[in-house]
């Protein structure tokens, strides 16, 4: 389950866990008690073009090597930083922007309609259940993993949302990154690997091109 107040990752899972560390100085915010309601305001923070320099969204998506008809669930989608890009790059696919914050869900659905992205829809999640409408080829969490409580239970449940061959991509801030959540809130990549193994996954791929974050891809263990 998620922490008491879910934050939304500027792209990943507004489902309650936004990933700060965008244009805003997340180190000044209390990750445990800060909510990301007020989508219009946070859109300016999460979707700030300056973020592209270190988040490298295009490189992230292309590195996943998804077919054009892939189904993707962006947990902590927020205002759609990654979800909208996935929708553009997978025109024959389906993208679910998952978030806990009702205002974010409303904002992203309206954005999808405004930008004529019929393959993108926002999904209202529960603290302990992403509620992805249909099995997907990829679940991605950007700056959201460290917000998830009872991670073993959460990720075990997520396995039922993966298609055969489906993967889970986790991007989060390194302990030594100059931006991001307070250091005490971060989770080291070695711990992520151990926790995901305990939840029934094995590491599939690891990328090192992001300057501030680790990028780990997991698949269910045989």
Image: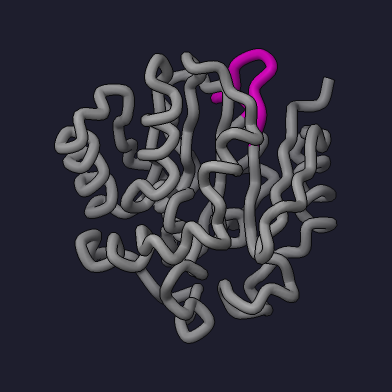
Residue found at x 67% / y 56%: 210
Residue found at x 84% / y 49%: 194
Q: Is residue 162 magenta?
A: yes
User: Residue 78 at what x, y percent from top left?
Assistant: 36, 52
Against 44, residue 107 (above or below) is: above
Q: Quadrant of residue 7?
A: bottom left
Q: Quadrant of residue 49?
A: bottom left
Q: How is the image coloured?
A: one colour
Residue found at x 64% / y 22%: 166
Against 176, residue 115 (above or below) is: above
User: Residue 65 at what x, y percent from top left?
Assistant: 63, 26
Res. 40 in view: yes
Of residue 88 and residue 137, the one placed in the foreground of this image is: 88
Residue found at x 62% / y 61%: 146
Res. 15 in view: no
Against 27, residue 199 (above or below) is: above
* Magenta-tinted stretch: 159-168
């Amino acid at each position: 389950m998620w922490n008491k107040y879910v934050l939304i990752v500027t792209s990943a899972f507004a489902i309650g866990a936004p990933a700060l560390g965008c244009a805003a100085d997340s180190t000044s915010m209390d990750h445990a008690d800060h909510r990301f309601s007020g989508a219009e305001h946070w859109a300016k923070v999460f979707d700030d073009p300056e973020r592209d320099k270190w988040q490298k969204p295009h490189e992230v998506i292309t590195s996943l090597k998804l077919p054009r008809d892939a189904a993707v669930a962006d947990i902590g989608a927020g205002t759609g930083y990654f979800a909208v890009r996935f929708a553009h790059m997978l025109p024959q696919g389906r993208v679910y922007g998952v978030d806990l914050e009702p205002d974010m869900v409303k904002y992203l659905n309206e954005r999808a309609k405004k930008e004529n992205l019929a393959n993108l829809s926002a999904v209202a999640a529960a603290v302990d259940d992403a509620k992805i409408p249909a099995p997907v080829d990829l679940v991605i969490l950007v700056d959201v993993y460290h917000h998830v409580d009872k991670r073993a239970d959460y990720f075990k449940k997520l396995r039922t949302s993966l298609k055969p061959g489906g993967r889970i991509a986790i991007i989060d801030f390194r302990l030594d990154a100059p931006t991001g959540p307070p250091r005490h809130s971060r989770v080291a990549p070695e711990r992520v690997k151990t926790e995901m193994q305990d939840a029934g996954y094995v590491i599939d791929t690891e990328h090192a091109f992001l300057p501030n974050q680790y990028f780990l891809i997991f698949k269910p263990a045989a």
